[in-house]
Amino acid sequence: MNTLREYYNTSPKFKLAMNIMCYVTIVGIISALLYFMTTSTYNDAHVGIVVVVPIALLVFIIALLYKGGKDYESYANSEDYSQDTKIKMYSAPWCPNCSDAKEAISIAGPDVSSKITIVEENVPEDIHAFPTFEVDGKIDEEMTVEEAIKVASN
């Protein structure tokens, strides 16, 4: 399970919500201090506005985070916002090693296979051996399928 710090570092929506919670808390504390410093009378209506409203906002934001926690996690893991390593496997339909590599990737599970893109068409001209892996834009003709699976599983 991811820690709050990991969510904070990987999800911009979660980071924004946490920052809003901090600002609302600070504003609530400052308004309560200003209210109690400037008035000598104790009025329940003012206390309700100054103290209860920021607390209600905090509870509302926490409820939104709790309800949408899985959405933030899936967004952080989506292609729209992914800090994961990008791996491409350049393959050829006639290559028996490529077939073995595809099978090994599928056996490794959906978490790994979803992170490795298999490219059989429009292969760059500077690729001379198959299968060849590209990790974060760098072509590595010596990388094995086992190494690619290990990188994808991290």
Image (cartoon, rainbow, N blue to C red):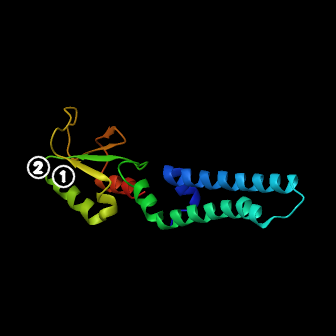
The residue positioned 66% from the left and 54% from the top of the image is 24
Foreground pick, 9 / 142? 9
Q: Farthest residue in the left direction?
A: 94
The residue positioned 28% from the left and 41% from the top of the image is 141
Foreground pick, 16 / 144? 16
Residue 70 coordinates in the image, percent (x, y):
44, 64
Secondary structure under the numbered disc 1 in the rendered image:
helix
Mark 2 residue crowding within 10 angstroms, few (<14) / some (14–19) / many (20+): few
Which amino acid type is shown beneath numbered disc 1?
A: Cys
As drawn, the label of residue 93 is 2
For the residues labelled 2 and 1, the Cα–Cα distance comes to 8 Å
Residue 96 coordinates in the image, percent (x, y):
14, 54
Secondary structure under the numbered disc 2 in the rendered image:
loop
Placement of the C terminus among the 4 image quadrants: bottom left
Q: Mark 2 and 1 residues: CB-CB less than 8 Å, in contact? A: yes
Mark 1 residue crowding within 10 angstroms, few (<14) / some (14–19) / many (20+): many
Above or below residue 84? Residue 103 is: below
Q: Can you identify the residue that label 1 sits on?
A: 98
Which amino acid type is shown beneath numbered disc 2?
A: Pro
The residue positioned 15% from the left and 42% from the top of the image is 121
The residue positioned 48% from the left and 67% from the top of the image is 67
Above or below residue 30? Residue 128 is: above
Query: Which image quadrant is residue 76 in?
Result: bottom left
Foreground pick, 145 / 32? 32
Q: Please indicate whether residue 93 sits to the left or right of residue 124 in the image.
A: left
Q: Please indicate whether residue 65 sits to the left or right of residue 131 in the image.
A: right
Of the numbered discs 2 and 1, the one sitting upstream in the chain is: 2
Query: Which image quadrant is residue 126 in?
Result: top left
